[in-house]
Image: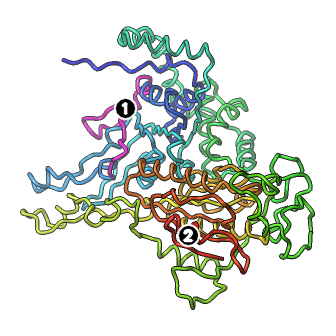
């Protein structure tokens, strides 16, 4: 008989106090809603997750849902909905002509831990369903001729590496607690960690036994805290404290308040107290708010010089036309100023000259009007509003299979898998089968829109930056409605920065976008190279998804991009607003093999 190797003891893991605290609180009260852990590789995410199973005391009155129930269940990335929630038992249908329920992973994890590694790469629909069951404790199945529900209580633990993509904010909020880990260890910590790991690898059974007393003590503390949960008093003054802090953090909805209250009660119970103190509220604050706290930029230019806009800036006015004068509020200079029209006399490729020396300026978004699109006829009416044109371009791009679109996506109908439970039901159990029922293909979730926003100094003239931000907001709105993923990179001042990490398109982003400043030269080439790396990584992490790159620029650069090819569809939106185009928008579009749209 082969003995299973024991897991590394939970109490033997050095450091990561916040992560341990979050796991212990979730073990005391699983209704908190699970724990989301974000951090790089090699920081003991999976080690602590697997070690948690060994210190879990059994839940009282736990129904046996599946004989193969395990204390620790892993949800693989390729899991289907049937695998997660359960489905029709094909064996009983075929052998006994009996309709019966076949339990899924949710039933197997009952009373234990359900671990999802790289939860940010999991299908959003599965994550949503998983969090629903975790919060309610009930799995309801209505599919394939089955109507079934069962109680299931487990601790949900999701880990992710933010370098591989962000989790949609709506899903982040569904996790009760969140911990952000780093790998900033001291020299002594690193030595201690290596020593413990080497001892475990040398004799895992003996090392685990040497920590058995600590493990048993922690297990008893968790069990005692569970028993005290219902007796812990939680005064109205402390509820008010939570409500005030949640409002100050700008969280969405009331979920944060509820989770905060449960976590504070669990912390008080674990500390052996019969009532919640302010210390308990403070102890769990970061765990509750770290993934919910909203960053709210000021509605007016900050008085302090934060390094972005210089003192006396002109403010977030979309009609500001003077890029050289840093901060003459209320300037009435006309659109004929030469601040934006002389840009191609400066050496953009090197970033020197007047533009490269400018301080960054801010400008708010405004709605531009599109003049023409080369993919439409020459008689297209000018002066169409932003939303209308973006909808037209969006609809033309939707579903296009061009270079960079994998065969799986291009041949979606042929790639559809057979839904065997639905097929059995459709054929009323008759053999041989007369027809096959295929699984539907999810729409929208497998499309990434990567938006490149030109924030060089040349965009400050004639409200070009304001119009460009308006275009970006329009694209975000279209992506939000289509439930597609987005990512925004800004390039200007000889650097490329990330404005929005890859995620499902947010509902509101204008305030954050308005705070993006412009200035300096146009590092177009570096922006495209970084974009290519992002897209290639996206292809590896989500095979088969559609890729769309939106390059929003005035084309004022001398850099060559002929040797750069981006996977997927590329659309160049030319924001240069002069009657005679002096930029290279058309040339850039041709070099990239992109569609072209001008305003």
Q: Is residue 108 left or right of residue 590?
A: left
Give coordinates of residue 508: x percent, y percent: 65, 62
| Pointer 2 with pointer 1, Cβ within 8 A | no
Give coordinates of residue 497: x percent, y percent: 66, 49
Q: Compare residues 150 and 209 and report the one nearer the observer.
A: 209
Q: Compare residues 509 and 264 and report the one nearer the observer.
A: 509
Give coordinates of residue 306: x percent, y percent: 83, 46
Q: Please say if 315 is above or below 307.
A: below
Residue that appears at 91% across and 52% down:
311
Residue density around tag 1, few if under 14, some if 14–19, many if 20 or more, within 10 Å: many
Of the numbered discs in the image, which one, if any, rests on residue 478?
2
Q: Which residues are magenta?
A: 52-80
Read off the residue under disc 1: 72
Residue that appears at 45% across and 11% down:
211
Q: Please say if 161 is above or below 330.
A: above
User: In what element is the residue under mark 2?
Assistant: helix
Point out the image quarter for the C terminus.
Answer: bottom right
Q: How many marks?
A: 2
Q: Compare residues 315 and 418 and report the one nearer the observer.
A: 315
Residue that appears at 67% across and 61% down:
557
Of the numbered discs in the image, which one, if any, rests on residue 377?
none
Q: Main secondary structure of the magenta part?
A: loop
Q: Please say if 300 is above or below 198.
A: below
Give coordinates of residue 13: x percent, y percent: 51, 19
């Amino acid at each position: 008989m082969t003995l299973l190797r024991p897991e590394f003891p939970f109490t033997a893991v050095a450091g990561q106090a916040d992560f341990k605290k979050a796991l212990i609180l979730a073990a005391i009260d699983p209704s908190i809603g699970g724990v989301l852990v974000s951090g790089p590789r090699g920081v003991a995410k999976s080690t602590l997750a697997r070690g948690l199973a060994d210190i879990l005391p059994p839940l009282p009155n736990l129904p046996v849902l599946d004989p193969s129930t395990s204390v620790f269940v892993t949800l693989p990335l390729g899991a289907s909905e049937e695998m997660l929630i359960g489905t029709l038992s094909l064996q009983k249908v075929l052998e006994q002509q009996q309709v019966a329920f076949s339990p899924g992973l949710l039933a197997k994890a009952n009373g234990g831990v359900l671990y999802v590694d790289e939860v940010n790469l999991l299908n959003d629909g599965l994550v949503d369903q998983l969090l629903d069951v975790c919060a309610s404790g009930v799995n309801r199945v209505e599919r394939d001729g089955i109507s079934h529900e069962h109680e299931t209580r487990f601790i949900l633990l999701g880990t992710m590496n933010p370098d591989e993509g962000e989790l949609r904010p709506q899903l982040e909020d569904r996790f009760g607690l969140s911990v952000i880990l780093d790998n900033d260890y001291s020299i002594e910590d690193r030595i201690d960690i290596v020593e413990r790991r080497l001892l475990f690898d040398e004799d895992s059974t003996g090392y685990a036994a040497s920590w058995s007393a600590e493990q048993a003590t922690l297990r008893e503390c968790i069990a005692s805290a569970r028993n005290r949960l219902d007796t812990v008093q939680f005064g109205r003054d402390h509820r008010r404290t939570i409500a005030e802090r949640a409002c100050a953090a700008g969280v969405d909805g009331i979920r944060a308040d509820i989770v905060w209250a449960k976590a504070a009660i669990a912390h008080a119970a674990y500390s052996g107290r019969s009532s919640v103190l302010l210390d308990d509220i403070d102890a769990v604050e970061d765990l509750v708010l770290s993934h919910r706290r909203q960053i709210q930029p000021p509605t007016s230019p900050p008085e302090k010089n934060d390094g972005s806009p210089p003192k006396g800036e002109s403010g977030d006015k979309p009609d500001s036309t003077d890029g050289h004068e840093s901060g003459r509020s209320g300037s009435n200079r006309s659109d004929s100023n030469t601040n934006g029209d002389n840009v191609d006399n400066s050496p953009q490729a090197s970033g020197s000259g007047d533009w490269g020396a400018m301080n960054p300026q801010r400008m708010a978004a405004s709605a531009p009007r599109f003049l023409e699109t080369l993919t439409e006829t020459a008689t297209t009416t000018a002066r169409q509003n932003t939303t209308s044109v973006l909808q037209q371009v969006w609809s033309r791009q939707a579903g296009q299979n061009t270079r960079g679109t994998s065969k799986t996506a291009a041949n979606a109908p042929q790639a559809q898998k057979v839904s065997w439970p639905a097929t059995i039901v459709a054929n009323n159990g008759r053999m041989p089968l007369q027809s096959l029922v295929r699984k539907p293909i999810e729409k929208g979730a497998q499309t990434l829109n990567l938006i490149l926003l030109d924030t060089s100094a040349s965009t400050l003239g004639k409200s070009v930056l304001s119009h460009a931000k308006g275009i970006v907001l329009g694209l975000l709105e279209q992506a939000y409605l289509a439930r597609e993923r987005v990512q925004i990179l800004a390039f200007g001042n000889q650097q490329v920065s990330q404005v929005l990490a890859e995620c499902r398109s947010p509902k509101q982003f204008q305030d954050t976008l308005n705070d993006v400043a412009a200035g300096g030269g146009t590092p177009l080439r570096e922006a495209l190279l970084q974009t290519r790396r992002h897209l290639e990584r996206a292809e590896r992490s989500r095979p088969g998804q559609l890729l769309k790159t939106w390059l929003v620029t005035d084309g004022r650069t001398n850099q060559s991009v002929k040797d750069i090819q981006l996977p997927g569809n590329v659309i160049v939106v030319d924001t240069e607003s002069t009657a005679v185009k002096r930029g290279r928008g058309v040339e850039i579009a041709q070099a990239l093999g992109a569609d072209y749209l001008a305003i």
